[in-house]
Amino acid sequence: MAKSDLPVRDSFTSKFGVIAAAAGSAVGLGNIWRFPYVVGENGGGAFLLVYLLFIVAIGMPVMLSEFAIGRKAQRNAIGSFKKLAPRTPWYFVGVIGVAAAFLILAFYSTVAGWTLEYIVKALTDSFAGKGEAEISGLFETFHTGTFRPLFWQLIFMGVTLWIVMAGIKNGIEKYTKILMPLLVVMIIVICIRSLTLPGSVEGVGYLFRPNFSALTTEGILAALGQAFFSLSLGMGTLITYGSYVSKKENLGSTVTQVTIADTLIAMLAGIAIFPAVFAFGIDPESGPGLVFVTLPNIFQEMAGGYFFALIFFILLGIAALTSSISILEVVVAYLKEELNLTRKKAAVFAAIVITMMGVLCTLSFGAMEDVTIFKTTFFDLMDFTASNVLLPLGGLLIVLFIGWYLGSSRTREEVSNENTLRVRYFPAYIFLIKFVAPIAIAIVFLYGLGFLKL
Ligand code: TRP
């Protein structure tokens, strides 16, 4: 088949476009909402250290593997495995990914909806003159409600759907390029204010002083889950995005840049949150509400806090959006390429199913708070199953696929752009994905889920 006969595949148009889209996927609520509260639930410094270790030893190699698979196969998360490993069960890795996409976007859209409510709260100056207790009360009243959280979730899913329907080029690239750097600037300003609050030192110590007695095997699993979640790994998001990346791109350097950006923003979020948590006497184990009850207190103490709050929550909403589109895209690319639905039909169908599951997540803080499975609410169950089970499992299978099925010479060809790039990191990468990552993931998994006991 001549090149021009190939169906024209949507793709990213520039180097910065790829990094922007991948970083846009990675940077989101995972960094600013999830990271601080998971750190808080797991005792601080020691958790952070393990998290960083996982990012480098497991996260980066998995990310490179996903990009390589997607770009080599030029297909969606499931189709890529069918193409590279025909007539084998490997495509099941993609099936796990598509399933995870449904679960993740369901609870993700709940929290993204909260950020939209907080844009309105900021706009209407709702935090002004309020103390810590009242600010916590605002969150409590709002997120346990029915109409407002559902309304915002619906709006968020609507916008996500609209962008994904527009396709990769006109949608995803355009929105990410300018706004992410602005978000970084905003967080740095918030960090400065947080660090200069009276009593902030304790929070800095909490985040950076490792206290290993606070770390449990569940905590280590949570660190692994957070690493996967934050870098958008284990689900085929970056297989799908990799399939839109040009053959001239340097995948290795893209991985480094995306990882640095993502980790930096999570760290900054931690530095913004924890000093304030201790300064205002908030419980670090407050759970999913942590960011929403902490940040408004900081804004209150800031010159120009009104504007900072407003701009910050707008940017957080946008960061959530550039991530949510990457999650929905996994499902849409699959339905479109494997089941031959149009992009539009695929997107609408997926969004409707996800929204229905999302409603359960949203209501699990209020009207359906008592409906539990295995003693957990829908929200926690979907988050736990996706982040701590499906993503690490997907990641494990992805590294096994590259390390033990595809093999190092075919992989080297792909990441070195047919041997035109120098890839000095390659032996280290192969060692990590063949041995270190699979063994580490398997051990963390079995202990974290309680199958093995120390
Ligand atoms: N990484 C994003 C965040 O931190 C969320 C996300 C996007 C994601 N795509 C994903 C998480 C794929 C897991 C898998 O907010």
Image (spheres, grey):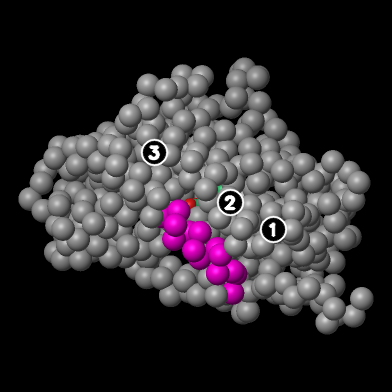
Q: Is residue 221 left or right of residue 177?
A: right
Residue at the spot 11% in from the left edge and 53% down from the top edge:
128
How far across and how far down the image is residue 5, in percent? 85, 78
Residue 362, labelled with which disc?
A: 3
Q: Is there CB contact under 8 Å for labels 2 and 3?
A: no
The one of 419 and 310 positioned closer to us in this rendering? 310
Identity of the amino acid at label 3?
Thr
Q: Considering only order in the chain, which callout, 2 or 1, is on the residue closer to the N terminus?
A: 1
Within 10 angstroms of label 2, few (less than 14), some, or many (20 or more) residues?
some
**Image quarter hosting the C terminus:** top right
Callout 1–callout 2 Cβ contact below 8 Å: yes
Residue picked out by circle 2: 349
User: Which corner quadrant holds the N terminus?
Assistant: bottom right
Kind of element beneath mark 2: helix
- Check residue 341 in the rendering and tell me which mark sits there, or answer none: 1
Q: How many marks?
A: 3
Residue in the image at 27% along x and 57% along y: 119
The reply, left or right, for residue 325 in relation to residue 191 is right
For the stretch drawn in magenta, the main secondary structure is helix
Task: Reply above or below: 426 against 367.
Answer: below
Q: Residues within 10 Å of mark 3 (few under 14, many from 20)?
A: many
The amino acid sitting under disc 1 is Leu
Q: Relative to the observer, which residue lies in front, 232 or 111? A: 111
Give the residues in magenta.
156-169
Query: Which of disc 3 and disc 2 is earlier in sequence?
Result: 2
Residue 447 visible in the picture:
yes
